Amino acid sequence: MKRFLIALAFGLLAAGSSVAAQDSAFAAGAASAGRDSSSLTAARELYASARYDEALVVLNALKPRDGSASADVKTIEQYRSLCLLALGRGDEAESAIAAVVTADPFFAPTETEASPRVRSAFSDVRLKLLPGIAAARYEAAKLAYDRKDSASAERMFRELVKLLEDPQMNGRLPDMRVLATGFLQLAIAAAAPPPEPKPEPKARPEPATPATPPAPVEPRVYGSDDAGVVPPVTIRQEVPNVPTAIAGMTRERGLLDLTIDELGRVVAMALRMPIHPMYDKLLMNAVRDWKYRPATVNGVPVRFRKVVQISLPRK
């Protein structure tokens, strides 16, 4: 219902010739905002009379100054942006729209809710503000996680991941998305209640075990100590950079245990010495793309176990 009322308010700009439609939209907006109806009515009448400066005076007096609910902020700033756009005061209108986007970064008027001019103004402001809003929300969610408020951290990181996947983010802040996803999984695990103990099953007679076929023979895995082995040669072994969000929180070194097959691919990996939970995930994703010239014995490619030490620079 609230989005419908907002759409009516935005329609005022696209249909300025209809004073009756403007009156209806402002009356609906005043009811939804839950503020002083007489003041909003006065602002509506001033706007309908093209007395935009006077309408702004009334609306400015209604701006919450004590941390009121974001719904009030959105409603008043939407009305202010209409007046400012009507006056051609684009910079101030952008500030009003910025207040709406900051209060609700997921809000964006659709084709049925607003004129092209208003939609374009919102799109431009969201494009500029979303990265900063995402960074601020990451810090707030991380603080909730650090103080062990798992329920709040889960909700905040879930909203942050949704924000980072917004089409207008256009793939920006990929490292933050990896970190937010990781912290979300940790928060979900911390918030989940412990599983109930399962009742002991009643003893039943064991059925006859059918004969099992012999297990397939695994190919031998060679190591650096085996005689006659030519070790693999590195073709691609890129180590990811440490995200700025965890800079200074990582260990200087890590240790990987890899199995490289006869085609030079990494087919198994184990982190023997972790560096940092978030960075470890980035590293393991990168290892899947590493490539080698395979090890050989008498010229024949073989599987090889390789130990790789990861050294990170200290800033």
Image: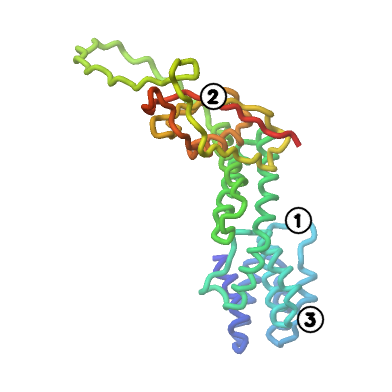
Q: Position of residue 186 (x, y in %)?
A: 57, 34
Q: Residue at x 65, y 30 (%)?
A: 311
- Compared to residue 269, the image places residue 151 above or below, namely below
Quadrant assignment for the N terminus: bottom right
Q: In the rendered image, which quarter is residue 104 located in?
A: bottom right
Task: Inspect the image, locate mark 1, and give the three-letter code of the amino acid beneath it.
Answer: Gly
- Which residue in the protein does label 1 denote? 67
Residue 39 can be seen, yes or no? no
Q: Real-space Cα distance between discs 3 and 2? A: 74 Å
Task: Inspect the image, locate mark 3, and give the three-letter code of the amino acid beneath it.
Answer: Glu
Determine whether the residue tagged by mark 1 lies in a helix, strand or loop: loop
Q: Position of residue 287 (x, y in %)?
A: 51, 35
Determine whether the residue tagged by mark 2 lies in a helix, strand or loop: strand
Q: Are marks 3 and 2 in contact (CB under 8 Å)?
A: no
Q: Position of residue 126 (x, y in %)?
A: 64, 64
Q: Are marks 3 and 1 in contact (CB under 8 Å)?
A: no
Task: Inspect the image, locate mark 2, and give the three-letter code of the amino acid beneath it.
Answer: Val
User: Which numbered disc flags the more N-terminal residue, 3 or 1?
Assistant: 3
Determine whether the residue tagged by mark 3 lies in a helix, strand or loop: helix
- Compared to residue 91, the image places residue 67 above or below, namely above
Quadrant assignment for the C terminus: top right
